[in-house]
Amino acid sequence: MRLAAPRLAALPGVDIVEVGAPINAAHLFADVDAAIVVDAVRTPDGRREPGELVRLELGDERLPTNVGSSLSSHGFGVGEAIALAAALGDLPPVVVLGIEAGGTTEGTGMSPPVGAALDALADLIATEAERLSSP
Amino acid sequence: MTHRSVEVPVVARVEGEGALHVRVDDGEITDLRLEIYEPPRFFEAFLEGRHFSEVPDIVPRICGICPVAYQMSAIYGLERLFGVQVPAGTRELRRLLYLGEWIESHVLHVFLLAAPDFLGYDSAIEMAASEPAMVKRALGLKRIGNDLMALIGGREIHPVSPRVGGFSKAPRPADLQAFVPRLEAALDEMGGIADFVAGLPKPSFPRPAEMVAMVHPDEYAINEGTLLSTTGRAFDAETFERVSREEHVEHSNALHSVMADTGTPYFVGPLARINLNAGRLTATARECAERAGLSLPETDPFFSMAARVAETALAIEESIALIRSYRSPDPPMVDPRPRAGRATWTTEAPRGTLYHRYDVDDEGRIVMAKIVPPTSQNLRHMEADLRAFVPSVLDRPDEELTRLCEMVVRNYDPCISCATHFLTLDIERH
């Protein structure tokens, strides 16, 4: 987000919110015209390489099952937060941008492939924000 | 005092699933093991070598639902060790911040985690599709807690203002006063919510138990006080590790807390608190407790939900009073001088008593940290509950048995309980 911030700052009405537990995001969807959700993802059966970027556009459709839910011990993940907002009829256009994680065991720092992909992810975030901001 | 933002590029190991192993021989349970929780051991190691001023930024990341609890347990303990006198008004502001977290966490649990089970839905999402008005109201109520935390804490979701020494920045009275109408409207809703909880069909499971909570002479204990159990044990943060012992359990990653002298389990949390702090309930909280069906002393863990409703009412009612008498602490914080030694403290997180210990050197660096979360302390008791409860429902099909076991565990609102179906039930019948 830091890398994307300069371009995002140029867009009116764009807020960056860091969400600790995705359940806390459920109410945020009701407030906005559009949302970009950025998160680490883990594709089951290793179909994606670490550092690979994933983009999913959601209209008012249910979250596709290939966006897995939580990597958090609070199992109410991003997928659930979006689905909850959708079930309540509160879901605006949402784009989910994910970066495939290198691994989710204990440790500090991100894996090299993920680190190398950050510029591309920041670019994608800023591009999406610019697209969603334009009339 | 400039605030330095600390990025913690850490992914703590997480378990999204739990396992319950049950072995039945001739209708008798011969083995029962519950594995659902990984305590924050990694964070304890990660804190070593850090300066005390960084601790309030690191520890809240242990829990996305109760960051304030972790900050307060750390901050109060370190302040006591250093002999810090915080500015007038700090204590009240800290209590208000914590009450915001209670509101947010309890409402989340009652409506999104527990209610679906009791109403027979597979998930909160399924429940939301069938009962959107109720879920929206719940999210609106939860949101008051989140918004209060955002205002006092300085940021949506993750508080940045709590510091050893006070707050880096304190809210203006006018900004807090703007919450009063929302809080008053929320308080009006609590009676109806108590009735709703009273009407939920639930198993009956009263059982003798040792409950532990903080107590305080003047208030419903949250940030300050001593510890008391329903069997009369009186202790405090300084003696905590002598009274409560962590035992390593074979075949499991988890450490189980038991009373050191008897080796018996105990539990913490809203049901324990309301039993031990009954005289400190606010008027609406007392009314909600009664309407929700609580008659104290209450030992049935299925009444934990009712206890959470009563505590939510207390949190709302006290918040209104605290906001009305609020004066911004000025200056918002003091500059603490570290001392070497051992810092210990407990506070009442939404899920129960949270214990922190920090061994600090004379430069204020953490030499060692020990954190005992409420869910850790409850584990053995959760197992004991299951062992007592499961025989009565052994004849049910595995899917229903799993759901009932999840409900027994979920009474404790453990950090794992957000997962809709979190138990892998492995049952061997012989």
Image (cartoon, rainbow, N blue to C red):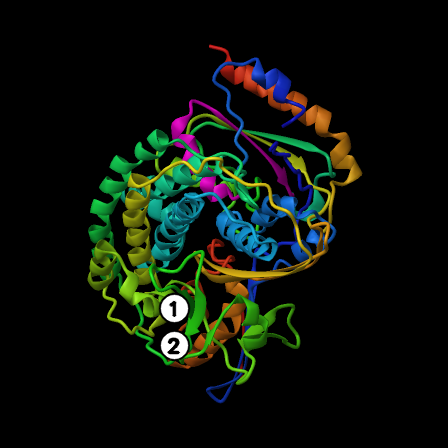
Q: Secondary structure at mark 2?
A: loop
**B275 or B130: nearer the eye?**
B275
Residue type, label 2: Thr
Find residue B276 and report its horizontal and vertical position in percent. Answer: 35, 69
Is there CB contact under 8 Å for labels 1 and 2? yes
Query: Residue sitting at 29 percent across and 62 percent down?
Result: B280
Point out the stretch of residues depicted in magenta. A20-42
Residue type, label 1: Ala
B262 to A23, vertically: above or below: below
**B180 or B210: nearer the eye?**
B180
Q: Where is mark 2, residue-wise?
A: B230
B3 to B368, vertically: above or below: above
Q: Where is mark 1, residue-wise?
A: B272
Q: Earlier in the sequence, mark 1 or mark 2?
A: 2
**B379 or B346: nearer the eye?**
B346
Query: Residue sitting at 74 percent across and 35 percent down?
Result: A114
Check disc 1: other Cα within 10 Å, few if <14, some if 14-19, many if 20+: many
Q: Secondary structure at mark 1?
A: helix
Query: Residue sitting at 73 percent across and 35 percent down?
Result: A51
* Residue A30 among magenta residues: yes
Q: CA distance from mark 1 to mark 2?
A: 8 Å
Farthest residue to the right: give it.
Answer: A112
